[in-house]
Amino acid sequence: MRDLGVGSALLPFLGGLPSFRELRAEENRPPRRLVIMFSPNGTLPNAFWPESHTVDGEGLKLKPILEPLAAFSDQMLILKGVHNKIRGDGDNHMRGMSCLLTATELLPGNIQGGSDTPAGWAGGISIDQEIRRFLQSQESTRTRFGSLEFGVAVPNRADPWTRMCYADSNQPVAPIDDPGRMFNRLYGGAQDRKHLSSVLDYVHQDLHRLAPKLSRDDKAFLEQHVALVRRLEQDIATAQSEQELQHPEPEIDPDIELVNDNTPQISRMQIDLLVNALANNMTRVASLQFMRSVGQARMRWLDVEEGHHSLSHEPDSNEDAQAKLLRINRWFAGELAYLAQKLASIPEPGGFGGSLLDHTQIVWINELGKGNSHTLSNIPFVLLGGGGGFNTGRSLDFDGVPHNRLWLSLAHAMGHESLSCFGSPGHCADGPLSLA
C-alpha cells in the first residue's frame, strides 16, 4: 500500500485484485474455499433422497426439495448413510447442532434439554475452524479474516441449540446475523446506521489515486467491487429506513416478538456479503447459519404460520404439515441455489480460469435426519461446487459411516492432509471417505 500511495482504509479493496492474487498464488493453483450452510429441524426423506445412489450416466434425478438446485446437479454430491454417531449427554437436538461440525461429545454442563442428562458446550473444535486454523498457519493462504460466520435469524441467546462453530473445546463462535454489523466488520467506516454514510466516501481519493496504476483486469475487478459495495450500502440503508432488521425467535424466548417477514431480504444481503468476502480474498472459510435447532421460525412469506419446529414434529400422515415442510425446505434449497449462482457468476481472479464456484466447496447440513423422529442417522449432506475436487453429479449411500470421516475427507480436500483424525477418535479409525 505504501508503494501504491494509498491508506489502510483501502485494504478491503485490494485483496481481490487479479495482480495481487497472482503474487499470492500457491503452487500455481487457485485458492480453495469452504462455505458451510446450515438449516434446521431435519428433512423429508421421501422428498429429498434421489432414488438411485449410483452414477446413472444421465445426471442426478432430483426430488422436490432439491429441484431448485437443478442447474447445479452436475456439481452436486448427495451423501446418504452418513450418521452422527456422537453420544453422551444432551438431547439429539443439542448433539445434532453442537456435535455436527465438531464430531465430538458435549462437555458436562447444566443445560437441560429433552434428555435425562444436562450438557454443556462441545468438547472440540469445529471442522470449519480447524480448516481456518490450517489456512491461517501458512503465509500463502492467510487472509484478513480467517473465517466469517454469517447468521440469518439466529437468536442472541447462547446455548448448544444455537451454536455450531467452535474455536476449540468449550469455545462456541457466535454468528453475526445483522447485515449492517457484518458490513461494518468488513469495511469499517460509519458506525451509526441511522445516519449511514458511504464507506466509499472515505476511500474516494485513494481509489482515484490508485486507478491509473492498475491493469485493465484490476480496474474491471475493482469497479465491480465498488459497485457491489455501493449497492449493499443502499440495500442496508433502505431496509433500516423501512423497519428494524428483526428476525424470528423461538417460542422459548417469550419476551421477543415473532417478527420475521424480512428474513428473505436479510438472507440475500448476507449471501451477497459472503460472496463478496470470498471474491475479494477477505476470507476463504465462511459459514451461513439459518435459524437454530428447535427454532420456531414462522415463515409467513411461504404462507406458513406455524413454528418450524412444531411442524417438524407432526406425523408423516399430516399432509398439511408435510406440504408446509416441503415449502420450507425448498426455500432453503433456493437460498443455496442463489449462493451457488452468485459464485458461478464471478470469474476466478488471478488467471486460473473457471468461476468462484469451481474453486469453492459448499456443504449444506442439518442437525437431524428426520424431525419427527429426532434421528441423527442419514443426515442430509449436500456438497456443491468444485473446491474439494470431489467426483460430483452423483448420489452415494455409505450405509452408516460416522460423519467424522466426512469431515476428515473435507480437511484433506482443503489441503490439510496431515490431519489423521477429526473429532472423537473412535469414529475415524477407518480414515476419510472416498469421494474422488
Image (cartoon, helix red, strand yellow):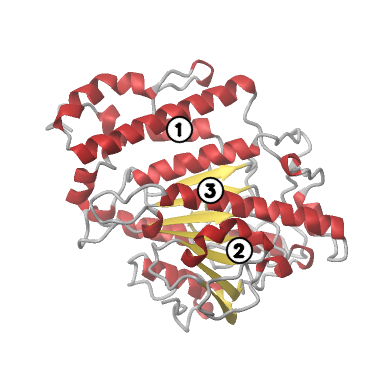
Q: Nearer the viewer, mark 3 or mark 1?
A: 3
- First in sequence: mark 2 vs mark 3: 2
Q: Looking at the picture, which amino acid does disc 3 mark? A: Tyr
Image location of residue 291, percent across then percent down: 64, 47
**How far apart in space, not on screen, are marks 2 and 3 (Cα)?**
34 Å
Q: Is residue 118 left or right of residue 357?
A: right
Q: Rounded to the nearest whole Å, what is the CA distance between mark 2 and mark 1?
A: 33 Å
The reply, left or right, for residue 17 in relation to residue 98 is left
Residue type at mark 1 is Phe
Residue 106's label in the rendered image is 2
Check the picture and name the quadrant holding the C terminus.
bottom left
Secondary structure of residue under mark 1: helix
Which is in the foreground here, disc 2 or disc 3? 3
Q: Secondary structure at mark 2?
A: loop
The picture quadrant where one finds residue 178 is top right
The residue tagged with tag 3: helix, strand or loop? Answer: helix
- On the image, numbered disc 1 is attached to which residue? 183
Q: Residues within 10 Å of mark 3 (few under 14, many from 20)?
A: some
Question: Earlier along the polypeptide chain: callout 3 or callout 1?
Answer: 1
Quadrant (top left, top right, bottom left, bottom right) of the N terminus: top left
Q: Position of residue 345 (x, y in %)?
A: 41, 48
Give me the residue at 65% from left, 34% from top: 262
Q: Where does residue 114 sit, x and y in percent of width and height? A: 78, 60
Figure check: 289 above or below 14: below
Which residue: 50% across, 64% down? 383
According to the picture, the residue beneath numbered tag 3 turns out to be: 338
Which residue type does callout 2 highlight?
Leu
